[in-house]
Image (spheres, coloured by chain):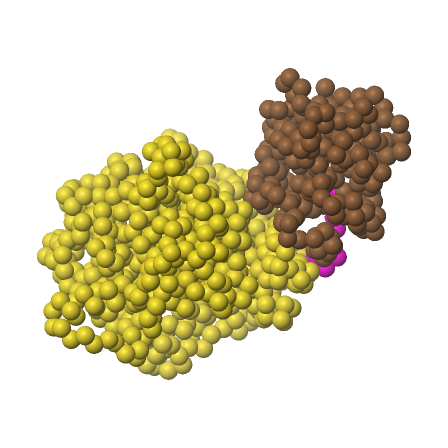
Amino acid sequence: MKVDISRMRNIGISAHIDSGKTTLTERILFYCGKIHKIHEVKGKDGVGATMDSMELERERGITIASAATNVTWGDEVINIIDTPGHVDFTIEVERSLRVLDGAVLVLCSVGGVQSQTITVDRQLKRYGVPRLAFINKLDRVGANPVKVTEQLAEKLGHNAVLMQIPIGLEDKLEGVADLVSRRALYFDGADGEDIRSEDIPDELKAEVEARRAEILDSASHFSDELMEAVLENRETEAQIHEAVRRGTIAQKLTPVFIGSAYKNKGVQPLLDAVVRYLPDPSEKENFALDADHDNERVRLVAEPSGQTVALAFKLEDGPYGQLTYIRIYQGSVRKGVELHNARSGHRIRVGRLVRMHADHMADIDEASAGDIVALFGVDCQSGDTFISSGRKLTLTSIHIPEPVISLAIAPIDRKSADNMAKALHRFTKEDPTFKTHVDPESSQTIIQGMGELHLDVYLERMKREYRVEVQTGAPQVAYRESISRKAEFDYTHKKQTGGAGQYGRVIGLIEPFADGIYEFANEVKGGRIPREFILSCDKGFRAALRKGRLIGFPITGIKITLQDGNSHDVDSSDNAFQAAAQGAFWQAYERAKAQVLEPIMKVSVEGPAEFAGNVFASLNQRRGMIVSSVEDGTFARVDAEVPLSEMFGYSTTLRSLTQGKAEFTMEFLKYARVPAVIAERLMTEYQDRRKKEASK
Amino acid sequence: MVKQELIARSPLRILEQSLSGGLGKGNIGVLAARKGVGKTACLVHIATDKLFQDKPVIHVSYRTRVDHIITWYEDIFKELARQKDLELPEDFHDEVVRQRVIMNFKQDGVPTEQVLRSVEALITAGHFNADTVIFDGYEFGRPESAADLKKFREFAARLGLEVWFSASLKGDEPLFNERGVPRELESFLPEMDVLITLKSAADHVRLNLIKNHDHPVAKGLHLHLDPKTLLIAEE
């Protein structure tokens, strides 16, 4: 089935943990499924059976696990893309954001804008994703949708406007009053599936009019037609919808909806709003880079014809085998056709093409621009671009941060060992921020990632999905070494021990390089070092960078310029120049004031304001630098920069300091110099360890 | 070296001289003007000058978002470096930033006691040895303002802090009385040690010293706010 692109929506549901994102997603799938079911049941086999709750649960179990779920709401098709909830998975979050055309930002009506709301909102903003807000949990004590709407404006800078107001609140929540249509909506039936529309209750009429005027005021900025109509008191609902839609797509207006997913209230109007206000895939600009033409930006056209460009944004090892989720940006993908992987150059044949629904998977023959579908049995990495023959287009490569933490793991038995290799292979393919290698010195398997929790999730997945039991060591911070000033080298490697000798001389300088790990520049003139040995020098430098001499960690942020040197017709060789480069590097390294760097995390702590003092103290004890704090009367958020090495066990400390009422999130920020005292300690430990190993 | 020069050549030395050595610990200084004249710019310049002297600053804002305040500091910092044409050492910026914390409170929701409690928690529990605290955007026209100001005073004295306020003037013309005191701040004058008003002229904003501790007010400050760079400058 081909879908009309204007009836297609690709949306994500983003939230702070505990805002009720999962419940809302479940309800959306349920209501969409329900409509689908009723339609199908009555139309085909006439069996009017309703599902029992067990079946429903099972269905939900499947749906929540898939990366993109295709549902139907009325005549519209919505792909709901799962956006991982935790900031530890930055790369995964960002990749899934790329494929969204719109998003629903879920907020708790009590907690309001919380630390992760800010993070996900910032990410959505960076990728230019238009959004609606849904204030959930109106049934909770202390619910205050007006306050939360104000927070959207104050804390996130949204031009947020309430589209509904609650009828009753907390345990007296009855329904919602829709401001545009001036109707009161109640959600009847066991699961709130029957919507009853009535007149606005008298006591709410004044507020409805006042808030409706606010909508008109905000929306008329985006439509002259509406503005004129409002002046003459003849605005229509369609005019208002059109203006709100324009404002939303331009990301200058955030319509706010309210409800309680748990109490089955307000979900269907939210779905109507998704269709009404969020853009279809053709309304968002997307670009690819032309790898053959200096990465020139090429605008993609969301039409079924033209060269196919699709992004593999998620790999999943599900109960049905390996699935590769793709978003098609241009052209079409048909069963049986051949595509190229723009990164590896490999050709793939599209075998099975499927669409993931809430309760089943459907085989399809073709899908076109704008759509999100899955391929079976395709070998690729997450983030790869598939193209049909033509220009070598890749979707913008996403910057991949270096892992900041590592953990040694050892399988407890033979069977676990086999499966562990499989699991690690899969995880590294799925998630480029998750890395693994075998340490040549200890022969231990090391896994690396973006935080303690990041690695925990993979250990848990190993256990659950691959039945792998492992023993783990203590988590290790990924320190780095670097230099702080320029230093010159002039080094000759010379050996004459019978047979062919070794000779190579290199002259040049090393200096700090802020923009990356390593850069090599060759300024040797007149062939004083033959061309093939320049490469040997580069190789030699790279080898030296792998392990620093202060604490044995990789060296980063170095630019090396090779200026001059000498070679010998007979005695110079690849090996000789590699050795010369290494010798030269270590000669200059000491003089360049080598230093130890550590990862600094951006930490955000949130909790009741009364605990602010405890939070300040706990961050200070951890060498934290407090950047800011924000208080709104009841809640406080403290943002700080704290070295990762000090953050182990912080969740336990925070819990005991705040009676479990505060929580924190963290993400990698930057590498920074370790204070001298600590650097000294790390260096001593490293030297002791080396001595011990040597004496063994 | 660079730091010393930045400090010595700052026009804020003139302000200090006029104030017979500065605002001084335990004292309250107020910058008053209509909205949009440049109070925050002046406060951020004063704060940055303190930071250059390794004196930690807490910037409390009631209205502006934290990221906007940070942008203010970044802009002023860059402008100062550019103007003095100084090659700043790499770590200098980070060192300066380490000495600064921005706190944001919602004035409607957070009573002054709680604001002061949180600021004090940062200083004591958080071991943040503040020299100066800036309260930017505090609203003076409230019923509780007189009582609040006494609390701020007690707080400044007890913790030995220099405290600067911005006061946004909203009244009808004439804004100022014959002594140049903003009419809406007249009743608070006894609680203020220093009062400076900002008045916009043709192409700049002039700083007027209205109250200087218990000293008679000397003639002119000879300082203005450059509307292009948003820095305090000599006339």
Residue A96: where, in percent of width, then height?
34, 55
Q: Give the yellow chain's letter.
A: A
Left or right side of A539 for A59? left
- Residue in front for this viewpoint, B151 or A385: B151
The structure residue drawn at horizontal position 64% and vertical position 53%, both measured from the top left corner, is: B109
Residue A126: where, in percent of width, then height?
41, 45
Left or right side of A391 for A91? right
Q: Quadrant of residue A391?
A: top left
Magenta segment: does it hold A266? no
- Residue in front for this viewpoint, A369 or B7: A369
Q: Quadrant of residue A656?
A: bottom right
Colour representing chain B: brown
Magenta segment: does it hold B133? yes
> Hey, which residue is sitting farthest top in the picture?
B202
| The N terminus of chain B lies in quadrant | top right
Residue A129: where, in percent of width, then height?
37, 47
The structure residue drawn at horizontal position 45% and vertical position 70%, both measured from the top left corner, is: A456
- For the question of whether residue A594 can be seen, the reply is yes
- Residue in front for this viewpoint, A251 or A431: A251
| The C terminus of chain B lies in quadrant | top right
The structure residue drawn at horizontal position 65% and vertical position 35%, both measured from the top left corner, is: B40
The magenta segment: B124-134
